[in-house]
Image: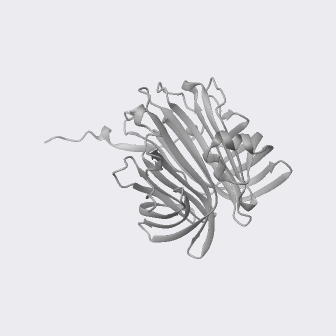
């Protein structure tokens, strides 16, 4: 009878030094990514900010997305050149770790494309050409209000898991709900942020086409109640894998099962949703209504010339659960096949 080697046990490890850039591995598509979002619950404004260092490819993915009043969105994306993974600082966007797991900040100095109709970004070349570019400054601080969720899976004896770089989205990932305070200035318009958000980090090989679709809902109701609901599918013919957590007080309760039932417009973009989530403690029913949404995309050609197209709809969303008002994101990623997002039912 075979005896299991205890060293083959898989554990999740998260260390304070993981808050800082790692030594890149040899994967061509190595990506070290930090993402932070922040929303003011009462004013229903906010934004998200991301840097993904792809140092082995010589550039970073830099994104700034600001949700203004009246449905307007300020957006900027760039692939600034980088030669080192020593810092998260590219294209005018800088992310600083002041105290691991407790205090981070974002500073941006540059421009955004100001969109009265954020749907224009479905055709980014036209959107950037036909909408004004507006000087923008962002200074926001994030202070953790929750434990950390996630880390790097590895064997108990410290060995790395084998990662197929061509099919990987990340080898490590963690998230945390935070209090967020600061300012965003877009042209002559100053927006104060006094609210909450979520931050995450991942590293390892990544292709945006490594999974078929996902639904990612980071939601904040206050510093004592928040959640992240996640459903990820690696294949178009398989159901999604549920995950996430609920912050109750100062503890995270892991989500063991969940569903996200969305309403769609004619372009297959989410407009509203009903969310059900279950932990070992209880079940939650959440409703969501999109306030403002911008469609983004990633395109890549395989070595044999196949064109791949990923769509990500990024929506600031109003939520309600247990009679409490919340705010956050509904981020839906789908591979586009035959002109339609793979995880979205086709309209009749």
> For residue 98, what is the image quadrant?
top right
Q: Is residue 300 above or below residue 1?
A: above
Residue 9 visible in the current orientation: yes
Q: Residue at x 66, y 30 (%)?
A: 80
The number of numbered discs placed on residues in the rendered structure image is 0
* Quarter of image, res 211: top left
Image coordinates for residue 177, horizontal then vertical, percent: 60, 55
- Answer with the quarter of the image where residue 9 lies: top left
In-image side of 69 versus 214 (left or right): right
Residue 141 percent across, percent down from the top left: 72, 49
Q: Quadrant of the N terminus?
A: top left
Residue that extends furthest to the left in the rendered view of this protein: 1
Towards the viewer: 37 or 67: 67
Q: Decide which of 290, 16 is in the foreground and name it.
A: 290
Task: Identify the residue at horizontal 16%, vertical 40% (top origin).
Answer: 2
**Residue 97 seen in the figure:** no
List x then y, in percent, for residue 323: 59, 76
Q: In the picture provided, is 161 more to the left or to the right than 341?
A: left
42 or 211: which is nearer to us? 211
Q: Residue at x 56, y 35 (%)?
A: 32
Residue furthest to the right in view is 188
Looking at the image, residue 259 lies above or below residue 312: below
Q: Is residue 286 left or right of residue 223?
A: left
- Residue 268 in percent (x, y) is at 51, 56
């Amino acid at each position: 009878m075979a005896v299991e080697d205890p060293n083959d046990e898989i554990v999740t490890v998260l260390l304070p030094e993981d808050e800082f850039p790692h030594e890149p591995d040899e994967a061509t598509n190595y990506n070290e990514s930090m993402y932070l979002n922040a929303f003011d619950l009462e004013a229903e404004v906010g934004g998200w900010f991301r840097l993904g260092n792809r140092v082995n490819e010589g550039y970073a993915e830099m994104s700034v997305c600001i949700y203004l009043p009246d449905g307007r969105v300020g957006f900027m994306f760039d692939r600034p050149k980088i030669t080192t993974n020593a810092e998260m600082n590219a294209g005018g966007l800088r992310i600083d770790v002041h105290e691991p797991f407790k205090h981070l900040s974002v500073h941006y100095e540059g421009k955004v494309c100001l969109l009265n109709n954020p749907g224009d970004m479905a055709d980014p070349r036209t959107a950037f050409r036909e909408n004004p570019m507006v000087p923008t400054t962002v200074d926001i601080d994030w202070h953790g209000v929750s434990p950390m969720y996630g880390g790097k899976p590895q064997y108990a004896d410290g060995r790395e898991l084998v990662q197929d770089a061509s099919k990987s989205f990340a080898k490590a990932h963690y998230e945390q709900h935070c209090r967020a305070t600061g300012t965003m200035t877009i042209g002559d318009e100053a927006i104060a942020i006094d609210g909450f958000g979520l931050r995450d980090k991942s590293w390892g090989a990544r292709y945006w086409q490594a999974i078929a679709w996902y639904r990612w809902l980071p939601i904040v109701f206050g510093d004592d109640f928040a959640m992240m609901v996640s459903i990820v599918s690696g294949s178009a013919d398989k159901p999604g894998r549920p995950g996430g957590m609920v912050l109750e007080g100062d503890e995270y309760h892991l989500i063991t099962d969940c569903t996200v039932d969305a309403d769609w417009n004619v372009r297959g973009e989410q407009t509203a949703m009903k969310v059900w989530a279950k932990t070992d403690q209880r079940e939650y029913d959440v409703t969501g209504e999109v306030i403002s949404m911008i469609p983004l995309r990633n395109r890549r050609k395989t070595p044999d010339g196949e064109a791949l197209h990923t769509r990500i709809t990024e929506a600031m969303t109003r939520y309600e659960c247990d009679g409490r008002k919340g705010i956050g994101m509904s981020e839906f990623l789908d591979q586009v096949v035959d002109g339609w997002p793979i995880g979205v039912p086709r309209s009749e």
